[in-house]
Image (spheres, coloured by chain):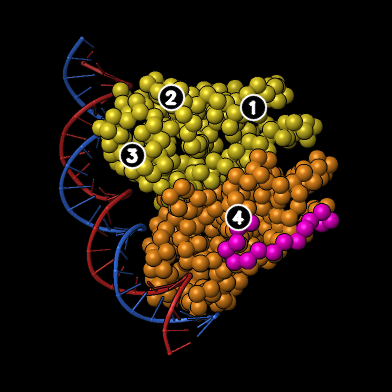
Chain colours: A orange, B yellow, C red, D blue
Amino acid sequence: MSIAETAQSTGSRTRPPVRSLSSDGQGVFPGADGNLIALRNIGTRLRFNHNQTIFNEGDPAEHAYRLLSGAVRLCKHLADGRRQIVQFLFPGDLFSFMELAGHSLTAEAVNDVVLISYPQRQIVRLGAQDPSLRERFVVLMSQRLHRMHDHLMLLGRQTALERVSSFLLSLKERKGTGEGDALDIPMSRQDIADYLGLTIETVCRVLTKLRRSRAIGIPNIHQLIISDVDALYALAEGGA
Amino acid sequence: MSIAETAQSTGSRTRPPVRSLSSDGQGVFPGADGNLIALRNIGTRLRFNHNQTIFNEGDPAEHAYRLLSGAVRLCKHLADGRRQIVQFLFPGDLFSFMELAGHSLTAEAVNDVVLISYPQRQIVRLGAQDPSLRERFVVLMSQRLHRMHDHLMLLGRQTALERVSSFLLSLKERKGTGEGDALDIPMSRQDIADYLGLTIETVCRVLTKLRRSRAIGIPNIHQLIISDVDALYALAEGGA
DNA sequence: CGCCGTGTTGACCAGTTTCAAGATTGGTGG
DNA sequence: CCACCAATCTTGAAACTGGTCAACACGGCG
C-alpha cells in the first residue's frame, strides 16, 4: 500500500489491487525510512553478477540483505530441476530478515546487483532494543504473507493470460511508470515462466497475443510498453 | 520441525519433508505451550457449524483465534467464484494473529468447530510486554511463510498426482497417524481441489488411481488408509 | 562473419478440465 | 425400518489449455 498505491497509474479511475510483486523495503512507510537508520552503520556493500547465487536454500542465514540496485529472485528448486520463483526483489527491498533457522529460499541475481548485508545477530539485537524496528519487521512479514496469498491464487486458479497480465501490472505498479512509458523487464522469459508457473513458450505466446491485441508494445526483450492499462486490468481479472 | 518431525511416520528411514499443512500452534515448541498461558484468561469460547463463515476477507480483524476442535479453512475468493484455499487449520492452531489491518483471508468452518477468540488489542498489549510471546509470534509467521513457499511450488510446478500425494502425506504427518491407521479427512473433495488448485473430478480420479495401485485404501469418504507410505512419498516427489 | 544463448513461432501431444451421467451417502418423514 | 430426496462423490467421454518438441530468428560478441 502507501507509495505503491499513491504512485500507481496515471490513467483512469481506481482499480482492484494487483499486488503480488514485492515492494517491501523502501516506501512501505512513505517517509518513515528513519526506522532503518539503525542499520545504516552495520552493513557491508556487496556485488553480484548476472545469475550469480547470493545464498542457497538451507545455508545458515548469517546475514540479511537490502537490495540497492538490480533485481534478485528468490526461488525453490526440486530435485529434478523444476524451479518455482517465489518473489522478485527490487531496489529498496529487504530480504532474509527474520530467518532464524537457515535460508528457506535460494537467492540469485537476476542482473548485476549491489546490495548491503547485515549480520543477523546485530539485527536481532537492534530489534530487541527498538520496538518500532520490530513493528517494522512484523509489518514486512505480514505484507509478504499477503503477497504469498495472492500468488497462491494466481498459481492455483488463474489462466496463463491472467497470470501474465497480472505480472505486468504488478511490475508496473511496483515501478510506478505511467501509461505509455517503457517498463524495464530485467528478468528473462524463463524467470517469468518460473514465477508464473508456466513454460517459457506460453509466456511468449501470451506476450505476442497481448502485443497483437495492442494492449502492450515490446520495443525489445527487456522493455515493454503498456499501451492499454485498462485492457490489461480486465484480462488480469478474468475478463477473457 | 519439532513435533511434526518427531512424531512423523512409523515406517522406514528418514524422508524428505512434505510439510505444507499447518501445524502452527500447539506443538511448535514441544513443551513450551506455557508461552500462551498469558492468553488463557482473555479468550472467549465460540462455536461454528459446518460451512459457517467465521470471518470474511476484508473484515476488521478484531479478534485472533485458537482452534480447539474441528477444522477450518482459510481462503481467497475471486469475483467469478473461483476459490483458492490457502491453509487448513486443525486443533491447536492459532490464526489471524498479527493481522494489523483487517483479515486478509476468509475463514470458514470445514466441519463443526470450537474455537477461542482473543481481542487483538489485548494480544498486542501482551506482546509488547512479553518478549518470548513476541518471539513465538515471529516463529509462527516464519513457519507460515515456509509453508506458503512449499505450497507455491506445489501449485506452480507439481502434477495432480504429486499434489494429492503430498497432501495426503502432510495430513498424515500433521495427525501423526501410523501406517495402516485410518486417517481422518474432514474436508470435502471440493475443499481438497481448491487447496490443490485442481478440480474435484481430478482429485477423485487421482484418489482412485492411488487406490487401484494399492497405495491407499478408502473405507469411506472422510477416512483413508495409507497402506504404502513409501510409494506415496515417491509419487509426491515426482517418481511418477 | 559466424557462433551461441535467448527468444519466438508452429505443429502436435498430454494432462487437466468440462460436461454429463450414474452411484453413494446422509438426512427426513412416513 | 424403509423410501425418498438432496448433496456429494465417482466415472466416462470429449474438449481445451498449456506443454513438448523442433525449427527458426534475433542479438550480442569473439
Q: Nearer the viewer, mark 4 or mark 1?
A: 4
Spatial distance from mark 3 to mark 4, Cα to Cα?
A: 34 Å
Q: Are marks 1 and 2 in contact (CB under 8 Å)?
A: no
Relative height, residue B209 to residue A171 (above, below): above
Residue at image mark 1: B29
Magenta region includes residue A51: yes
Mark identifier at residue B11: 2
Q: Are marks 1 and 2 on the same chain?
A: yes
- Magenta stretch? A40-54
Q: Is residue B161 above or below residue A72?
A: above
Marked residue nearer the N-terminal end (1 or 2): 2
Amino acid beneath label 2: Gly
Q: Residues within 10 Å of mark 1 (few under 14, many from 20)?
A: some
Of the residues under marks 2 and 3, which one precedes in the sequence?
A: 2
- The reply to whether callout 3 and callout 1 are in contact (CB within 8 Å) is no
Given the image, on which type of amino acid does mark 3 rest?
Val
**Lateral position of residue B40 relative to residue B13, left or right:** right
Q: Give the foreground label among 4 and 2.
A: 2
Q: Which residue is mark 3?
A: B203
- Dot in front, 1 or 2: 2
Label 4 belongs to which residue? A107
